[in-house]
Image: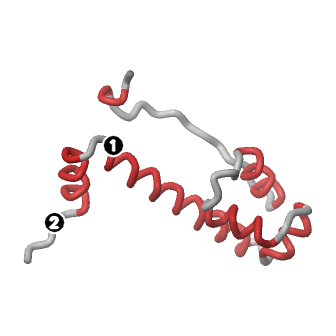
Amino acid sequence: MKLKKFETYLDEKDEQSAGYKADVELLANIELLGLQLQELRKKNGINQRELAEKLQISQQRISEIEKLNNGNITLKTLLQYTKKLGYDIRFQLEKISDKSVL
């Protein structure tokens, strides 16, 4: 069985179901951000419990933030998390394609 390139696979699935590729890319970016948050905390030599105490929230909430698996995680929450560790979040808008224009 010949393996397809992942990009080719996504393109084919996107033809079958519009938006599939964008959804997969979004989920991948969310996962990457969560991993970056964990790495940032660990790089600062602090565990989830300690960071939770500094932010005055629960350790479970820190876990939810790092996994980004709770739809109630706001930009404000992410900014508080990163600022407590001495970092800021910056955003950049980029045009993705003419197809996505309404």
Vertical side of 74 occupied by 33: above or below:
below
Closer-to-camera residue (56/39): 56
Q: Position of residue 10 (x, y in %)?
A: 25, 54
Closer-to-camera residue (90/22): 22
Within 10 angstroms of label 2, few (less than 14), some, or many (20 or more) residues? few
Q: Secondary structure at mark 2?
A: loop
Which amino acid type is marked by label 2? Lys
Q: Which residue is mark 2?
A: 4
Q: Residue at x 75, y 56 (%)?
A: 82
Which residue is farthest top?
102
Distance between mark 1 and mark 2 Cα atoms: 20 Å
Which amino acid type is marked by label 1? Gly
Closer-to-camera residue (36/21): 21
Mark toward the start of the polypeptide (1 vs 2): 2
Q: Which color scheme is applied?
A: secondary structure
Looking at the rendering, in which quadrant would you find the C terminus? top left
User: Image quadrant of residue 5?
Assistant: bottom left
Q: Is residue 101 left or right of residue 76?
A: left
Vertical side of 102 occupied by 67: above or below:
below
Q: Which residue is mark 1?
A: 19
Q: Is residue 102 left or right of residue 92?
A: left
Vertical side of 92 occupied by 59: above or below:
below
Q: Residue at x 73, y 49 (%)?
A: 88
Q: Position of residue 6 (x, y in %)?
A: 25, 62
Q: Mark on residue 34?
A: none
- Marks 1, 2: nearer the viewer: 1
Q: Residue at x 37, y 24 (%)?
A: 101
